[in-house]
Amino acid sequence: MPRILVVDDDPMVGATIEVLLQRQGFDVTLTDGGETGLAALESQTFDVMLVDIFMPHMRGFESIRIFHERAPTTPLIAMSGYAFASSASPTPDFLRMALELGATRCLRKPFTPEALLTTIRECLTGAGASAQPKDKKEAP
């Protein structure tokens, strides 16, 4: 049974992902932030990590960089639902930046259950490491 670490400070998002993955037969460890996620990573091994980019107490990409450094061979899926207030100014591509810091794949929130499961399966089969990064987003 593949072990998945989910790190997200939003309790509703975390619980939704946890239930979905458990129903698909995954062993899920849900943590509510970077510190608790790192503690789980130090005490257990995981097959895939899902890490939110923007969480309290870990600024922006610090969490992605640290999680990748602590478990460099474990595929890391960066998640972000960050929205900008102004569409007039150019916006940085946070998910692409996460890839540069070690993320294997990225998911833009909100994403569909199918997009999440496909991305996890790609990471588990090794397709996540060699395939072109995908920015999966649910159609509006």
Image: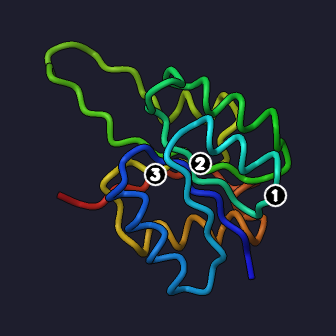
Label 3: how many residues lie within 10 Å, few (<14), some (14-19) or many (20+)? many
From this view, report whether residue 138 is shown above or below residue 82.
below
The secondary structure type at the circle numbered 1 is loop
The secondary structure type at the circle numbered 2 is loop
Say which amino acid is labelled 2.
Pro
Q: Which mark is residue 80?
A: none
Q: Which mark is residue 133?
A: 2
The single residue placed furthest to the top in the displayed view is 89
Q: Which residue is mark 1?
A: 44
Label 1: how many residues lie within 10 Å, few (<14), some (14-19) or many (20+)? few
Q: CA distance from mark 1 to mark 2?
A: 27 Å
Query: Foreground: 36 or 126?
Result: 36
Mark 3 vs 2, N-terminal side: 3
Q: CA distance from mark 1 to mark 3?
A: 24 Å
The scheme the figure's colours follow is rainbow
CB under 8 Å between discs 1 and 3: no
Q: Which mark is residue 107?
A: 3
